[in-house]
Image (cartoon, rainbow, N blue to C red):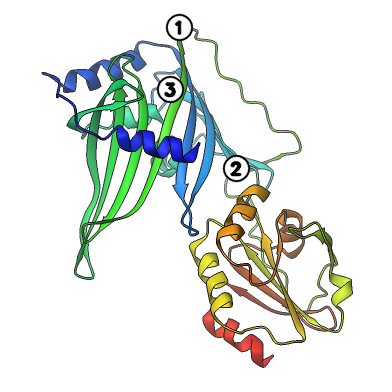
């Protein structure tokens, strides 16, 4: 599916005859959205990961017109990890990692606007993209035998270390349906494409129904108020390491108690984290672990299939634990990569956040 979406989007950038008035397509697309009370669609995003392949994100978006809303629409955008909700001025953010729904204060509209301006799920919604006024017509394109108008705009254009950094954003509007059905963001450095991600919008449903949106609190989640969440701290050095029994990637049981008398290094990581990837490569390129130490790659945030796919491309330097969210909570790991070193007696000896080469080199001397 990934290859199909990528190839389809690239075909869509091939040249066809330009329309006589291409900006009319964009105008009609905007008018079509504004002329309907209720809009929904599915969203499929392909994002490059450090292993050189793509991660896939799925979202479902629902919009209902509301003239009082900053977007002129209320919305529910449901994703794998976060839900963004704005209904009658009440903004909520559901976090699947923390199992919380954060309520934003009504008297702080600037906080809601900050989310609207920065949350990628909202910025990359077809509603938000069509509201941007700096689109320039590029050319007509074709995808799956359908004609599209391709528009682009420049997000970043600056010099860095003697090279030009350029970020382009493209949207594709179906000339028959007048719906925005594709988006690409491309990053260039010194004229070379360094990163590209692709979004496809499909299964549009448009109607005149004005039934208000209703968001159901996910089962098992708790409600918190913005700014009232206590800052969490990583497990303290000198404390007894919480025991655990968990399966590794191969289905073998891993028990902390079995390693008493040896040092244990826990590496809390995510396959989409660039610094985590660098740390894995650093382990693969260097002999870092002494004989009296065992290490575990503890995957957080990622689905097991994503972890398996990643380590089919990248050599695993030590045992991989794919479903490590429960372990992350036990150890209060707050970032990735997050290294926790446990001594021979089962006591936390050191905690390190980030890719720290000097710390990793010091393991051999422990």
Who comes first in sequence, dot 2 or dot 3?
3
Q: Which mark is residue 81?
A: 2
Question: Is 357 situated left or right of 257 in this image?
Answer: left
* Residue 212, percent from left and from top: 55, 15
Q: Tag 3: Cα neighbours inside 10 Å, few (<14), some, or many (≥20)?
A: many
SS of the residue under disc 2: loop
Q: Which mark is residue 73?
A: 3
Question: Is 317 situated left or right of 120 in this image?
Answer: right
The reply to whether residue 90 is in sight is yes
The reply to whether residue 354 is in sight is no
SS of the residue under disc 3: strand
SS of the residue under disc 1: loop
At 61% from the left and 84% from the top, the residue drawn is: 287
The vertical placement of 81 against 37, above or below, is below
Residue named by callout 1: 208
Who comes first in sequence, dot 2 or dot 1?
2
Q: CA distance from mark 1 to mark 3?
A: 13 Å
Who comes first in sequence, dot 1 or dot 3?
3
* Residue 17, percent from left and from top: 15, 24
Label 1 or label 3, whichever lies nearer to me, is 1
Q: Residue lying furthest left in this view?
A: 20
* Residue 8, percent from left and from top: 37, 33
The vertical placement of 17 against 34, above or below, is below
Quarter holding the C terminus is bottom right
Q: Tag 1: Cα neighbours inside 10 Å, few (<14), some, or many (≥20)?
A: few
Q: CA distance from mark 2 to mark 3?
A: 23 Å
Q: CA distance from mark 2 to mark 1?
A: 30 Å
Question: Is 28 situated left or right of 59 in this image?
Answer: left
The image quadrant that residue 327 belongs to is bottom right
* Residue 109, percent from left and from top: 44, 37
Given residues 27 and 334, the one toward you in this image is 27
Given residues 320 and 39, the one toward you in this image is 320
């Amino acid at each position: 599916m990934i290859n199909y979406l990528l190839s389809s989007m690239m075909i869509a950038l091939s040249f066809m005859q330009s329309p006589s008035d291409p900006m009319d397509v964009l105008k009609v697309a905007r008018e079509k959205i504004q002329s309907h009370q209720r809009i929904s669609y599915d969203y499929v995003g392909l994002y490059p990961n450090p292993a050189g392949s793509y991660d896939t994100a799925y979202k479902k978006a629902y919009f209902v017109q509301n003239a009082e809303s900053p977007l002129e629409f209320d919305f529910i955008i449901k994703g794998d990890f976060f839900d963004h909700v704005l209904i009658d001025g009440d903004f909520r953010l559901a976090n699947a990692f923390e199992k919380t729904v954060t309520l934003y204060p009504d008297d702080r509209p600037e906080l809601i606007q900050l989310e609207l301006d920065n949350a990628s799920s909202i910025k990359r919604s077809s509603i938000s993209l069509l509201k941007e006024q700096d689109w320039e017509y590029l050319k007509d394109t074709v995808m799956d035998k359908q004609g599209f108008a391709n528009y682009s705009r420049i997000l970043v254009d600056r010099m860095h270390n003697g090279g030009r950094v350029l970020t382009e954003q493209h949207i594709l509007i179906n000339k028959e349906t007048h719906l925005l059905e594709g988006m690409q963001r491309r990053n260039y450095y010194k004229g070379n494409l360094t990163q590209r991600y692709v979004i496809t919008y499909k299964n549009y449903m448009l109607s005149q129904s004005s039934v208000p949106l209703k968001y159901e609190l996910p089962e098992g989640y708790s409600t918190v108020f913005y700014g009232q969440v206590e800052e969490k701290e990583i497990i303290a050095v000198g404390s007894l390491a919480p025991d655990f029994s968990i399966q590794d990637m191969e289905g073998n049981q891993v028990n902390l108690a079995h390693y008493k008398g040896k040092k244990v290094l826990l590496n809390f990581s995510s396959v989409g984290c660039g610094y985590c990837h660098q740390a894995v490569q650093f382990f693969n390129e260097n002999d870092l672990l002494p004989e009296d130490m065992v290490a575990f790659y503890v995957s957080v945030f990622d689905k097991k299939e994503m972890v398996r796919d990643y380590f089919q491309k990248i050599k695993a330097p030590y045992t991989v634990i794919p479903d490590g969210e429960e372990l992350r909570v036990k150890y209060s790991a707050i970032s990735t990569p997050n290294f926790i070193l446990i001594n021979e007696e089962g006591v936390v000896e050191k905690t390190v956040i980030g890719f720290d080469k000097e710390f990793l080199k010091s393991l051999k001397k422990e």
